[in-house]
Image (cartoon, grey):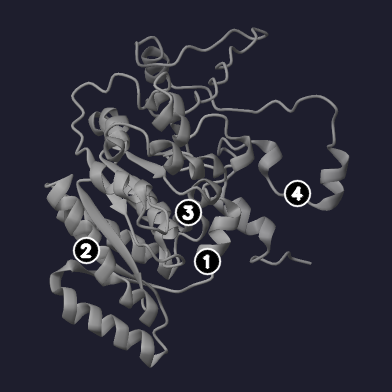
């Protein structure tokens, strides 16, 4: 019986005639033949002898040298593993021709729970994401800023309290790097609550923080101070040291009522202690867009302060609280969330107004 002309064997025989230099082991074979040719030794590949011209060309520099039979083949040594990434230079090392802005910004509101600490952490992280070097100063005795960046207040050995009252402690002794590249922290704990009592007897007590932060202006682009929820001596120190003020304002009626007292305090500091102090802007926080009340408060703030109100509005989301529990900003905890994008937009506005 004649074999099928379209069988697999005949098609391969037509494509690869017997004189074609193909490895014998690569040809498809019948199952019985394949079982019979299982050998323990290495199969020798049959190749056609090279033509004379090819043999002559083998001596040229372009030709690859052929090792003698039995000579061990030299293998390329494995490439060494990639070296670890070079860490960013420490803020106290030489920075060459690096130009810094040295902007000190106080994040202030005498009402608690309006998003001061959340705004300080996430705005600082957003500025660092844009390539700026940022220092956060936790100036609240509650230490919420330090906790929000993963520090345990009970384990802090040197804090902003020591920086204020101990002349042997410098800023470089207190600065702590955070988990975010380009973002550093001056931590705080409950010890700071005693500072206001001690500062009463100090000479030029309103300018202590300004003196302590002067070295940071030559190193960092932005220094953000998280102020306590009061208008006491600590807040006055922050306003005296700052170039500008950012006021987080919760979109709620009682937060709006306190704005007059806060602006009055800022005005007094401008007149008596820091004539260069400016209000950079007011940022609306914790907005519940589904409520009429929140939209009305936002509208009144826009009418009262005009261009001082940032265009970016921070909406309320549980992601902020979850990021604080994890000890990282929302830009690291949920980088694609709406809250992270809103603080990126706010950072761009801050950079435009600070430049």
The answer to whether residue 279 is seen in the rendering is: no
Which is more toward the observer, 334 or 292? Answer: 292
For the residues labelled 2 and 3, the Cα–Cα distance comes to 32 Å
Q: Secondary structure at mark 3?
A: loop
Q: Earlier in the sequence, mark 2 or mark 1?
A: 2
Q: How many marks?
A: 4
Pointer 3 local density, CA inside 10 Å: few below 14, some 14–19, many at least 20:
many
Which residue is situated farthest in the front direction here? 201
Position of residue 341 measured from the top left corner of the image (x, y, whole percent) = 37, 64
Q: Which residue is mark 1?
A: 319
Measured from the top left, where is residue 313 in percent x and y? Answer: 31, 72
Measured Cα–Cα span from mark 4 to mark 2: 95 Å
Query: According to the image, label 4 marks what residue?
Result: 29
Residue with the mark numbered 3: 329
Name which quarter of the figure residue 115 lies in: bottom left
Q: Circle 2 sits in a helix, a strand or a loop, which is it?
A: helix
* Element marked by disc 4: loop
Q: Earlier in the sequence, mark 1 or mark 3?
A: 1
Q: Which residue is mark 2?
A: 264
Q: Earlier in the sequence, mark 4 or mark 1?
A: 4
Q: Residue at x 55, y 44 (%)?
A: 190
Residue 223 position by quadrant: top left
Closest to the observer, 309 or 197:
197
The residue drawn where x is 54% and y is 70% is: 318
Q: Dots 2 and 3: beta carbons under 8 Å?
A: no
The answer to which image quadrant residue 283 occupies is bottom left
């Amino acid at each position: 019986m004649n074999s099928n002309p379209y069988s697999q064997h005949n098609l391969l025989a037509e494509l690869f005639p017997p004189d074609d230099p193909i490895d014998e082991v690569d040809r498809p074979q019948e199952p019985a033949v394949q079982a019979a040719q299982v050998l323990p030794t290495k199969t020798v590949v049959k190749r056609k002898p090279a033509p004379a011209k090819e043999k002559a060309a083998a001596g040229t520099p372009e030709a690859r040298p052929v090792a003698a039979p039995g000579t061990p083949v030299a293998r390329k040594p494995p490439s060494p593993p990639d070296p670890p990434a070079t860490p960013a230079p420490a803020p106290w090392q030489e920075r060459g021709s690096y130009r810094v802005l040295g902007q000190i910004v106080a994040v202030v509101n005498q009402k608690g729970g309006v998003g001061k600490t959340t705004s300080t952490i996430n705005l600082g992280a957003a500025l660092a994401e844009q390539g700026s070097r940022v220092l956060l100063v936790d100036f609240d005795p509650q230490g919420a800023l330090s906790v929000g960046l993963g520090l345990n207040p009970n384990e802090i050995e040197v804090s902003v309290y020591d920086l204020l009252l101990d002349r042997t402690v410098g800023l470089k002794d207190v600065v702590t790097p955070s988990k975010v590249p380009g973002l550093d922290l001056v931590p705080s704990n409950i010890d700071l609550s005693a500072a206001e009592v001690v500062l009463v007897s100090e000479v030029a007590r309103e300018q202590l923080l300004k003196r302590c932060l002067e070295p940071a202006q030559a190193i960092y682009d932005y220094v953000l101070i998280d102020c306590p929820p009061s208008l006491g001596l600590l807040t006055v120190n922050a306003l005296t040291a700052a170039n500008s003020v950012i006021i987080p304002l919760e979109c709620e009626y009682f937060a709006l009522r306190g704005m007059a007292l806060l602006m009055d305090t800022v005005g007094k500091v401008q007149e008596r202690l820091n004539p260069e102090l400016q209000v950079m802007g007011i940022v609306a926080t914790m907005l519940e867009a589904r409520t009429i009340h929140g939209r009305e408060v936002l509208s009144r703030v826009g009418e009262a302060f005009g261009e001082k109100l940032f265009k970016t509005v921070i909406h309320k989301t549980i992601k902020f609280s979850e990021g604080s529990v994890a000890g990282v900003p929302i830009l690291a905890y949920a980088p694609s969330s709406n809250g992270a994008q809103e603080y990126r937009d706010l950072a761009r506005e801050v950079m435009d107004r600070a430049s």
